Amino acid sequence: MNKFSFKYYKKMLKKAISCGFTISSFENFDKKKKKTIILRHDIDYSLKGILEFAKIENDLGVTSTYFFRVHSSKYNPFSQDCYYILNYLKNLNHEIGLHFDSSYFSEIFKLDPISVFNKEKIILETIIDKKIKSVSEHYDIYCNIFNIQKLDSQINIKKLKIQNYAYDKKFVIDMKYISDSNGNWREGDILENLNFKRLQVLTHPELWFDKVQFIDYLTHQKDD
Ligand SMILES: [Zn+2]
């Protein structure tokens, strides 16, 4: 089976549930549960795959957190498509979080990273008409090229007054953190990590597709 197909995603979640895991968004995370998986989705460049993921999770009775950017040059959170998706997620009780770009954005334009962060948060909150409780940082390729550090190494992240910071010690050190970044489960996928009791699983829905979307994805990449 294609390990980046929606079918395989569903298979992994089903297996985790049958092994006794409670699967949830950041906001619904209950530390009292013995076996837990937090599902995190970073929406980097494309809205592809979000509806499929959201439906699969809802069909299985679980929630997850979808982190959206406001600075992406590839999608606009206030476009019709995205607005529809945001409402769809809200109706299924999935959480919407902020995938912030504050570190490199403030570096480029010589701005205060905290004020950039707060602006991003207010914009997304205004669009979804709801307070943002959870955030994750977008680490762009430019951050590597220009050696721009993550926000938590520039400022005390507590100043942001956020309930859940995805890179908080309790979510990445006290839990096994696995990711499908660049289409590669470097430390194995969900099925290969069910020996851990607590997991934060980061996926990028745009990387998951069926055959037709695969061709589409390659075309899209060529256009960039
Ligand atoms: Zn990202």
Image: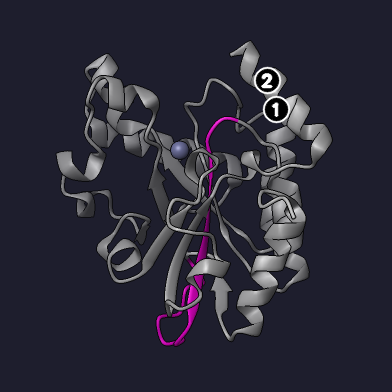
One can see residue 120 in this view: yes
- Secondary structure at numbered mark 2: helix
Please provide the residue range marked out in magenta.
27-45
Indicate yes or no: mark 2 CB to ligand 1 under 8 Å. Answer: no
Is 220 placed above or below 2 here? above
Note whether residue 91 is visible: no
Q: Is residue 61 above or below residue 136?
A: below
**Is 2 placed above or below 188 here?**
above
Q: In this image, 151 relative to 74: left or right?
A: left
Amino acid type, residue under disc 1 in the picture = Tyr
Residue 43 lies in what quarter of the image? Answer: top right
Q: Position of residue 65 (x, y in %)?
A: 54, 57
Q: What amino acid type is highlighted by mark number 2?
A: His
Q: Secondary structure at mark 1?
A: helix
Q: Which numbered circle lies on residue 220?
A: 2
Residue drawn at x 28%, y 16% as measured from the top left: 108
What's the residue at 66%, 83% (across, down)?
18
Identify residue for label 1. Answer: 217
In reply to whether residue 43 is colored magenta, the answer given is yes
Q: Position of residue 22 (x, y in %)?
A: 56, 79
Does residue 90 appear left or right of residue 203 in this picture?
right
